[in-house]
Amino acid sequence: MIRAALAALLLLAAPALAEVEVQEVTSPGGIDAWLVEDHSIPFTALEIRFVPGAALDRAGKRGAVNLMAGLLEEGTGDLDAQGFAAARDALAAGFGYDASDDAVSVSARFLTENRDAAVDLLRRSLVEPAFTQEAVDRVRDQVLSIIASEATDPGAVARKTWDAKAHPDHPYGRPIVGTRDSVTGLTRDDIVQAHRDTLVRAGLHVSAVGDITPEALGTLLDELLGDLPAASEAPMPGDAGWSIAPSVEVVEFDIPQSVILFGHEGIERDDEDFFPAYLLTHIFGGGGFESRLMEEVRVERGLTYGIAAYLAPREYAEALLGQAASANDTAAELVDVVRAEWGRIAEGVTEEELEEAKTYLTGAYPLRFDGNANIAQILVAMQMDGLSPDYIDTRNDRIEAITRDDIARVAEELYRPEDLSFVVVGQPEGLQPTN
Amino acid sequence: MLKRLAFSLALLAAPAAAQPVDDVTTFTLDNGLDVVVLEDHRAPVVVHMVWYRVGAADEEPGVSGIAHYLEHLMFKGTDDLEPGEFSRVVAAQGGSDNAFTGPDYTAYFQRVAADRLGLMMEMEADRMRDLQLDDRDIATELRVVQEERNQRIENDPSALFSEQRDAAQYLNHPYGRPVIGWMDEVESLSLEDAVSFYERFYAPNNAIVIVAGDVAPDEVRALAEEHYGPLEPTADLPERRRPQEPPQLAERRLTYEDPRVAQPYLVRTYLAPERDAGEQETAAALTLLAEILGGGQTSELATRLQFGTGEALNVGAFYNGTAYDDTTFGLAVVPAPGTSLEEAEAALDRELASFVEEGVDAEQLERIKTQIRADEIYDRDSVRSLADRYGRALTSGLTMEDVAAWPDILQAVTGEEIVAAAREVLNRDRAVTGYLTGPGTAPDEPVADAPTPASAPMPDGPASQEVTP
């Protein structure tokens, strides 16, 4: 009974359209932002990205941008760290500061009734951070603690090992937090320089969603960001390259379950084959229970709790990556299955797999646009990817247009079992390292 | 301030603020199924959740982990659905689905386009009564659960530490057992264990359906009656009564040493009352106490130990009052370089004593209350988290009235009541104090020079005792 009903529904699963209207706003001072107005809840979610981010760390100063981002909420002008926190809390505003290699991120939310005061406080943290020596030393100790902890965290060790092999001569090859030596050596001047290098109007992306008009947003942008310098003083990073020779590397670690990373070079976000590659990789290792990897590794064999593969197109390098974890006595089997599946996906997909993936991806897309905070994050990510607002309306059509021939062609180029590398952290039994 | 899991706009740990009541509708079907509807018409999306009033704390001794294992098996098919078909159908609608198990609840949910709600109800109603399990599927899934335990617990010293502390905290109550189960018991869970647990607890009169999103209450009622209405209730649902804790007469202490620990820290948990139906005042005071002691840069412990004496790198306080039985109030200190765990603990006790003498800073309390009020606005941005809040409350013995009353109860708490709650609860004779250390971490050795070690620099409260499939 149920199955009959389902079959009917599968056919008419026409996706709803995302009901968001993006307005492109330019402030009187010339700062661009994307806005979705929604006055049903009296607050605004704001997302800001300064591009690039920690990839601008100067030579020998790895960790400077990360530490700088952590210090933005540690005081400004006559407000020390606690004074700043008290002022923010009294306004019931929320500010978040974070750094990745590709961006310094600022996320904020504030009530309409407190908007002006909240924006002024946020401005002070971005434009006039105090970076007192006391705060630098205190937060530096927090970072050193994180660095020490990551040294014994198998997931962090796996990523660090992978990145160092992939990009030995680029900031991507070294952890964003820096090393114990580099962070210990950072001075207040280094932090000031990292701030000057990254928080600039060139490479700025902004989105706002919620209870705010285009006019009010324009004013806000100039107040908040108008006093930042126009451009960075730092030399822009170059391409990160790709240096991993196909290999299996084992990092010995006394843990019961091996952590496994795998992959090879990927595809650029603006490559014309990105859409087929994305769909293909969804079929191979996308989230949820339906991917080939989940089916073969978890459902069929019980070798892992979770396994996924994904495209990671970044500003200076593109990767096709996967990860999983498996008990030491089954890790080698998992590696074998991944290799076999990597070869099988290179031969393309079935018509049924293609249709299921299209149905899922086109149906899921409009569901992402719920909530001011979610929408603001989507919009700023689109800007970082170089997309225009009409992408929202055309994206599903581009997915629908992909044929099995497209997939077959891209699969053969993109998935190359002979280039596959593994980094395994643990004590995998019977797994032969190749270097 | 930097934390590994840094970005947190959630200013308050879990204040369980309710949405303005006019957006909430509830009704009960004839078979005892409770239904809650939370309206949000901004996007054509709906979250459909089924919460069962059963969790790991309702397991019999010897089969720890059976509630969670059953949750995995609920995706393995019914008389009408093939194994895995449930999730395939949801995905074919562009939706996502998952489930999670806690000490007091087991919950299943889907997020789909609003016009697919009926299909979700059809499938959830089907597996509420007609689960059908096959030997091979369940054996493979048991390996998956063991890998989940490896990933969440065995590979993570701070999770093992948390498990040991919980076991020490509860001598008699099943909250002392991990939700995912002890590994040796998980390994021997059987089909019969799962089926008997399922037949005992999965019934419409032991469940709550929560629908949140772009729906109208009338439409939800009609769909619920169509799909869930025909299900027979279970006549003899077991009374929900777990073994309770005997009076704790002596302080309990433990040190967990693990070579993977790079950053030592200490956690103290005190046995504490939870929110009770019609009687949430003490829990409200403790909720505010946790904010006052450990909520962010201006908290008492941050002011005193991070910014004041510099003895701590990080501090935290946590209290989750939404539980069926007695819960815990927790404090955590990550010592600064050069401060030993013993010194950090002495500093913690010194400052707690001083705080109880000096009382609550009125401005700080007002800031916290302001944020709680603001959260009632911010929380409306995510109906999923609102739905979660109702689900947790209603499976913990609270009523809709309790949920609605909670924000006002929080606002009414006074500084004196907070101090009184602190005096009552912060008693070391009813506490477990745990140290997490690496090997040979000499008491006065600066952290950065410690030999190896590691784990989360900041324990963000009890490793969430919640596991998913």
Image: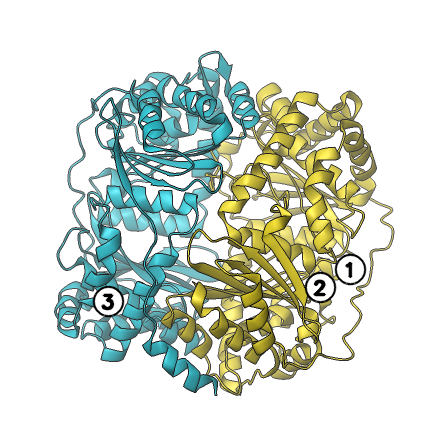
Q: How far apart are the alpha carbons under marks 3 and 1?
A: 49 Å
- Residue A266, above or below A292: above
Left or right of A123? Residue B194 is right
Which of B323 and A62 lies nearest the eye of the viewer?
A: B323
Q: Are marks 3 and 1 on the same chain?
A: no
Q: Position of residue A309 (x, y in %)?
A: 31, 62
Q: Measuring 17% from the left and 31% from the top, which residue is drawn there?
A: A236
| Callout 2: SS | helix
**Colour of chain B as rendered:** yellow
Which residue is located at x 18 percent, y 50 percent? Answer: A243
* Residue type at the position of mark 1: His
Check disc 2 and give the amino acid type.
Ala
As shown in the figure, which amino acid type bears the numbered disc 3?
Answer: Leu
Residue A240: horizontal and vertical position, in percent?
A: 18, 43
Colour cyan, chain: A
Q: Is residue B442 left or right of residue A7?
A: right
* Towards the viewer: A129 or A356: A356
**Residue placed under numbered mark 1 in the picture:** B173
Circle number at residue A280: 3
* Secondary structure at numbered mark 3: helix
> Which residue is drawn at the image coordinates 54% and 76% (left, top)?
B73
B158 sits to left or right of A227? right
Callouts 1 and 2 close, C-beta under 8 Å: yes
Instruction: Give me the chain letter of mark 2.
Output: B
